[in-house]
Image (cartoon, grey):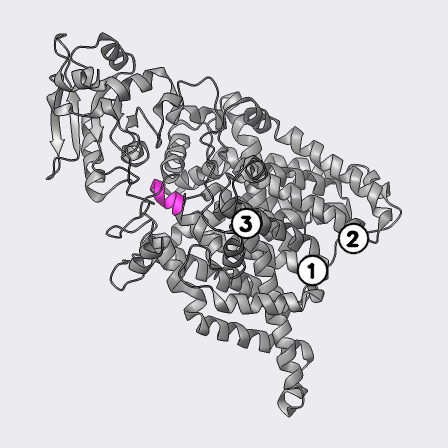
């Protein structure tokens, strides 16, 4: 990792291309994310800042509920169905507004939502400026690391995410269980949450953007989405305007989120779910405090949105809800009964709205659960996370300084102790995943794949709040020290603190070389840019893509292509629309069914094995594609795909200069004795 980041950071290794159409694509995806959810939130009178923060989550909630339903009734998923679903949800929510408000009588006290601070144009402008700056920094770091929104991410999960978006675009089927067609069509059951992909497909249908543009643009928006949610969260729970304005800017500087879960994996649906956790917490507090019937519906829909993005993030959301309930009950026992009933109603609504997704998840198989090994000692793991030094060369010292100052002044954000407590729990889970082995560790961290990168990303949600508080604590101290100055004394204290906070942020940006832009760009580029020494391998090179485009001109409609799942060829479906036998990286094909296991083990017996020939005819396999590079060091070509040049029933019709990459046309010859490669495998 350190060698990769060092090399990636060398001048000349990165190329950045920003096409003017990229701005249009960014705006189009912003519209797709915000417009349906924002219309729903404003229809029921939700406060503008809360509506803005929760709009993307509500959009994903609409997609989560409507996607499987459209498949059930035979409707094609796309922009029209998303709009219709949003309209129906708005009508239902407005109808809820006129239900008898008996929920208000669950408690003897009127308990309105904590106001998002002193209202006023200045406060709104300060928060908007912070969200805008943080969003721009995040987009800039992501785009510079990618080089272009069209660049192919070269890591593992990118293959499945790309093929999933292509599948929904091609078929209009937004049912998560239908994704078995990509790489699990021999299995009896399958489930993968697809709300992220469904919304991306809507943008694709509206704009005609390439598949990787549809993956990379949401990645670039992660920092802005999470920053907006954190800003509203802090104001909802009484933090100062300066802290709420600072938190989006500071979040964009953290490496562990949003960048590490964007280049590595890439864990895009999970990362989007993490980005929307603050908005979910705000919606939950709004519902518990106001007990408006429509708020229950929207919060239940938001919970479905988290589940549809990634069930493991929905579990994190539930943890935040439990902590929030504990905070509301602390010192206010009269809330216990009403909050408990409200929580039960929310849970019931979530189950009712998301029943198809929940049953699909419970009744089918979730793909490829990974248990990562321990890599360090407990003390080093703890220090690496708190010093923001996880898997990097140097700590992010200036962020650590702000976090420390914020921790010393934590009393100023005491209303957010529940938020910090949950993120502190993920610090502990990170240490367990990074430094310990054993069955209990696997059970405690298994929901997050025992993956320290995911756990660190969640912890950043608390770190950013501490750092933002640190800005205000430091600003207060500066104003106090300069209070005797005539110029400072003439300023209202709020204005003086705001000015000092702005100066501190500018100083932080300068000292951190532009909000840690260079190292964060280097981390992103390690999985994107051609010519870099990838530690994770290469899915598709420029030559691979040229070969796939040539293959698309050869393959007849309906034909499949035999491929090695671990050489990047699985991306042929996303990139050129050709259906491979393996649509995702598959280290153990034996888990994917007996037919494909037989093919990867014995395909080179095509001249002599009638069973292999029968499978070729059953699946209408017309060609074989052999990529030039395997994804991971130590991976080997599957035995049935060795020695293909010696198989008489295969005609090589395309090759690169090295002969490592090739396309073979199947032309069956009369059955013969076992060929040399087949005999070798026997």
Judged left or right of residue 338, residue 188 is left
Residue at 40% over, 27% down? 171
Quadrant of the image occupied by residue 619: top left
Residue at 48% over, 54% down? 256
The first of marks 2 and 3 along the sequence is 2
Residue at numbered disc 2:
112
Quadrant of the image occupied by residue 48: bottom right
Judged left or right of residue 307, residue 143 is left
Mark 3 crowdedness (10 Å alpha carbons): few <14, some 14-19, many ≥20: many
Q: Alpha-carbon distance for marks 2 and 3? A: 39 Å
Residue at numbered disc 1:
116
Judged left or right of residue 571, residue 58 is right
Q: Secondary structure at mark 3?
A: helix
**What secondary structure predominates along the stretch shown in magenta?**
helix
Q: Alpha-carbon distance for marks 1 and 3? A: 35 Å
Give residue 410's position: percent from left, percent from top.
68, 65
Between label 1 and label 3, give the one nearer the viewer: 3
Q: Can residue 275 be seen at all in this image of the molecule?
A: no
Taking 518 as reference, is 164 above or below it?
above
Q: Which residues are magenta?
A: 209-216
Give residue 214's position: percent from left, percent from top.
39, 43
Tag 1–tag 3 contact (CB < 8 Å): no
The first of marks 1 and 3 along the sequence is 1
Give residue 230's position: percent from left, percent from top.
60, 56
Q: Can residue 322 be seen at all in this image of the molecule?
A: yes
Give residue 287's position: percent from left, percent from top.
73, 45
Residue at 21% over, 15% down? 682
Residue at numbered disc 3:
431
């Amino acid at each position: 990792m350190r060698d990769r980041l060092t090399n990636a950071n060398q001048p000349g290794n990165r190329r950045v291309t920003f096409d003017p159409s990229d701005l249009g694509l960014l705006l189009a995806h912003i519209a797709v994310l915000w417009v349906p959810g924002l219309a729903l939130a404003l229809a029921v009178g939700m406060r503008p800042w809360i509506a803005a923060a929760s709009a993307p989550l509500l959009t994903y909630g609409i997609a989560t509920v409507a996607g499987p339903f459209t498949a059930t009734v035979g409707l094609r998923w796309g922009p029209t169905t998303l709009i219709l679903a949003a309209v129906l949800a708005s009508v239902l929510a407005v109808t809820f507004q006129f239900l008898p408000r008996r929920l208000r009588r669950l408690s003897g006290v009127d308990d309105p939502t904590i106001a998002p601070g002193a209202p006023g144009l200045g406060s709104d402008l300060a928060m908007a400026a912070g969200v805008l700056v943080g969003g721009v920094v995040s987009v800039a770091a992501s785009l510079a690391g990618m080089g272009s929104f069209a660049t192919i991410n070269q890591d593992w999960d990118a293959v499945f995410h790309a093929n999933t978006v292509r599948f929904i675009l091609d078929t209009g089927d937004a049912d998560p269980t239908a994704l078995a067609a990509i790489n699990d069509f021999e299995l009896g059951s399958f489930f993968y949450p697809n709300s992220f992909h469904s919304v991306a497909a809507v943008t694709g249908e509206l704009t005609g953007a390439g598949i990787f543009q549809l993956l990379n643009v949401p990645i670039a928006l992660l920092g802005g989405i999470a920053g907006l949610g954190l800003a509203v969260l802090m104001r909802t729970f009484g933090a100062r305007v300066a802290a709420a304005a600072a938190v989006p800017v500071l979040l964009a500087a953290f490496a562990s989120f949003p960048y590490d879960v964007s280049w590595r994996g890439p864990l895009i649906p999970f990362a989007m779910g993490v980005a929307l956790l603050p908005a979910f917490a705000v919606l939950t507090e709004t519902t518990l405090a106001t007990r408006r019937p429509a708020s229950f519906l929207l919060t239940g829909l938001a919970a479905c949105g988290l589940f549809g993005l990634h069930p493991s993030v929905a579990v994190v959301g539930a943890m935040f809800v439990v902590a929030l309930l504990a905070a509301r009950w602390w010192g206010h026992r009269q809330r216990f009964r009403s909050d408990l009933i409200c929580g039960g109603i929310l849970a019931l609504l979530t189950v009712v709205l998301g029943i198809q997704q929940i049953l699909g998840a419970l009744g089918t198989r979730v793909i490829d659960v990974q248990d990562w090994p321990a890599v360090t000692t407990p003390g080093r793991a703890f220090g690496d996370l708190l010093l923001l030094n996880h898997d990097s060369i140097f700590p992010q010292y200036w962020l650590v300084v702000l976090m420390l100052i914020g921790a010393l002044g934590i009393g100023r954000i005491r209303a957010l102790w529940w938020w910090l407590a949950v993120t502190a729990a993920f610090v502990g889970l990170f240490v367990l995943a990074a430094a310990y082995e054993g069955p209990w560790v696997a059970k405690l961290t298994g929901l997050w794949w025992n993956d320290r990168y995911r756990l660190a990303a969640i912890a950043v949600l608390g770190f950013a709040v501490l750092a933002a508080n640190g800005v205000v604590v430091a600003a207060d101290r500066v104003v106090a020290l300069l209070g005797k100055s005539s110029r400072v004394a003439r300023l209202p204290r709020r204005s003086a603190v705001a000015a000092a906070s702005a100066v501190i942020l500018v100083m932080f940006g300068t000292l951190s070389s532009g909000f840690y832009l260079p190292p964060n760009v280097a981390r992103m580029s390690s999985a994107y840019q051609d010519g870099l020494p990838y530690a994770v391998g290469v899915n598709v090179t420029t030559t691979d893509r040229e070969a796939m485009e040539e293959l698309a001109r050869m393959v007849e409609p309906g034909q499949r292509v035999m491929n090695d799942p671990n050489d990047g060829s699985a991306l042929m479906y996303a990139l050129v629309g050709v259906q491979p036998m393996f649509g995702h990286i598959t280290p153990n094909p034996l888990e994917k069914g007996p037919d494909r296991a037989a093919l990867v083990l014995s395909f080179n017996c095509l001249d002599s094995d009638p069973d292999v020939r029968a499978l070729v005819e059953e699946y209408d396999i017309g060609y074989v594609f052999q990529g030039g590079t395997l994804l991971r060091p130590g991976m080997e070509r599957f035995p049935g795909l060795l020695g293909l040049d010696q198989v008489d029933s295969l005609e090589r019709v395309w090759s690169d200069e090295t002969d490592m990459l090739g396309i073979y046309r199947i032309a069956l010859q009369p059955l013969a004795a076992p060929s040399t490669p087949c005999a070798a495998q026997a």
